[in-house]
Image: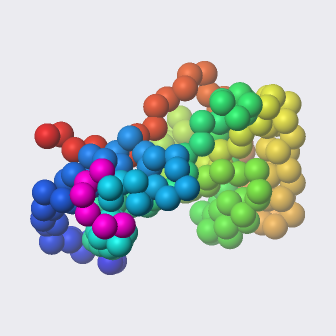
């Protein structure tokens, strides 16, 4: 779907709604989570997979993935590195930064001038602020080498609170 196109409204039936409710708190931590959900809903596992795939395809669900609790894993220093990169080089810069093994997510955002000049965001998790800053220095070196002259500034914003991450939720 290209920008500007709109999707037709998606109609969810009772089974779709039950499936969303059964998974909105996360998939069960079992060897066969779809089988467990199917048993709970009284349908077969193939039906669970088919319906989830259909909801992914039509955009009701954006993705199915693991969301680790970084703090529980010992990654207590979480820094969002922000970069002011020349717009002509940002796509190449983002691809390279996003491919680094210690960057968990990387994306482009519009600048909010005059207060916010940064347009590239890269999340770095570590067991200490020193570890995060060492990775940020690696990003800086990569950008200086891969897109010379395109980096104009940067900063790091460390998390000060744990924010709850949630997926799709139904109101009713």
Residue 85 drawn at (x, y percent) = 66, 56
Quarter of the image where one finds residue 93: bottom right
> Would you say residue 166 is visible in this rendering?
yes
Quarter of the image where one finds residue 144: bottom right
Residue placed most toward the observer, 36 or 133: 36
The quadrant of the image that shows the C terminus is: top left
x 55%, y 39%: residue: 116
Give the mark count: 0
**Farthest residue toward the bottom?**
1
Horizontal arrangement in the rendering, residue 118 relative to residue 58 (left or right): right
> Would you say residue 3 is visible in this rendering?
no
Residue 162 drawn at (x, y percent) = 55, 26
x 33%, y 59%: residue: 38
- Coloring applied to the structure: rainbow
Residue placed most toward the observer, 85 or 72: 72
Horizontal arrangement in the rendering, residue 119 relative to residue 152 (left or right): left
x 15%, y 61%: residue: 12
Residue 18 drawn at (x, y percent) = 22, 52
x 31%, y 67%: residue: 44
Horizontal arrangement in the rendering, residue 163 relative to residue 21 (left or right): right
**In magenta stretch: residue 121:** no
Residue placed most toward the observer, 4 or 151: 4
* Residue 23 against residue 97 in the figure, above or below: above
The quadrant of the image that shows the N terminus is: bottom left
Range of magenta residues:
40-45
Residue 11 drawn at (x, y percent) = 12, 65
* Residue 39 against residue 148 in the figure, above or below: above
């Amino acid at each position: 779907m290209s920008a500007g196109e709109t999707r037709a409204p998606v109609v969810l039936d009772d089974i779709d709604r039950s499936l969303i409710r059964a998974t909105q708190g996360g998939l069960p931590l079992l060897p066969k989570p779809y089988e467990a959900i199917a048993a709970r809903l009284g349908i077969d596992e193939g039906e669970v997979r088919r319906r989830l795939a259909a909801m992914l395809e039509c955009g009701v669900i954006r993705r199915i993935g693991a969301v680790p609790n970084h703090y529980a894993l010992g990654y207590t220093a979480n820094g969002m590195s922000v970069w002011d990169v020349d717009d002509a080089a940002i796509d190449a810069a983002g691809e390279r930064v996003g491919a680094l093994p210690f960057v968990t997510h990387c994306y482009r955002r519009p600048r909010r001038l005059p207060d916010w000049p940064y347009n590239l965001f890269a999340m770095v998790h570590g067991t200490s602020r020193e570890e995060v800053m060492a990775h940020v220095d690696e990003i800086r070196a990569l950008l200086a080498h891969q897109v010379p002259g395109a980096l104009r500034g940067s900063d790091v914003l460390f998390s000060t609170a744990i924010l709850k991450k949630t997926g799709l939720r139904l109101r009713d």
